[in-house]
Amino acid sequence: MHEISDMLAGLTDEAGTEGFLQNPFESTLHEIISRNLHVDVMNSILSGMVGDVRDFEIFTSGAFFNIVSLGDLDLTLVRYKQITKYIYSSPIAYSQAQISPGFSRVATYRLADDEPLADIFDPGRTIERVQILTTTPGQVFSKTYESIVDLAGFDTLPTMYLRLSAPPRGGYEWAFDRDTLAAKRYSTIYLAESNLCAIFDVLGEVGDAASEDYLERYTAHSHHFVRWKAVQSLAALNPARAFPIVCRLQDDAHPDVRAAAKTALSSCILTAG
């Protein structure tokens, strides 16, 4: 692990994040793979475990396993097991190399109107396919912040990659329909805020009076989707308590929250009780 950390430290000192965008560090990925350093790191992790797998700290969830983080760079194992329902944008730049056997296919897309994505959802946004690439083990593929890459849309799965990524620019990813290529929804890439919203959903069904107090605190959260989810869960528990908050959120800084608040009031979803 120390060897990879030293390599990443050298890259950060030499080029920084902006340098990453101009030089995707393909040679670094090639060296890590050719010397099997990523396997050495995982062997080291297993050797340090004390019996029970529950003692093992998972750094990232699902199909993403973070091997090394240093400064602005992350080295991650990424595994795609099946075709996903949507094509996802991602506000990160990375270089990655396939490490599983066989070949895989990668599709790249661009926004139809060339306008950057923001944290305000617009169902009118669409994407266009640019090209389909075929990758083989050890071949490096790079993604810019602006490009949209689909790694889970072909029957060549499952496929595993080793990815070297720069920090995100923005906190949201958009999901586009595979057939129409139209925007369907967007969500945060931040795990902590996602977990908060999951807790809110549960409390909206089984919470108690103490839950109402906590939920009300989060109606002023800095992330717009967190504060609106907190209001929704509070309304499920105590509509009368949520009513004045929803009234206030008609003047929220984020247009999605303002629209949702006005809809909730105009459709009589919430009343003063």
Image (cartoon, grey):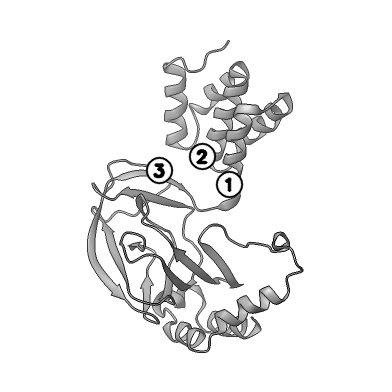
Amino acid of disc 1: Glu
- Crowding at dot 3, Cα within 10 Å, few <14 / some 14-19 / many 20+, comes out as few
Disc 3 is placed on an element classified as loop
Q: Counting residues from the N terminus, which is met first, the one under dot 2 or under dot 3?
A: 3
Q: Counting residues from the N terminus, which is met first, the one under dot 2 or under dot 1?
A: 1
Amino acid of disc 2: Phe
Residue 77 location, x and y as percent? 51, 70
Residue 98 location, x and y as percent? 41, 75
Residue placed under numbered mark 2 in the picture? 225
Q: Is residue 125 above or below residue 252?
A: below
Residue at 42% in and 23% down: 263
Q: Is residue 234 above or below residue 71?
A: above
Q: Of the numbered discs in the image, which one, if any, rests on residue 193?
A: 1
CA separation, marks 3 and 1?
A: 17 Å
Residue toward you, 62 or 236 = 62
Q: Nearer the viewer, mark 2 or mark 3?
A: 2
| Quadrant location of the N terminus in the rendered image | bottom right
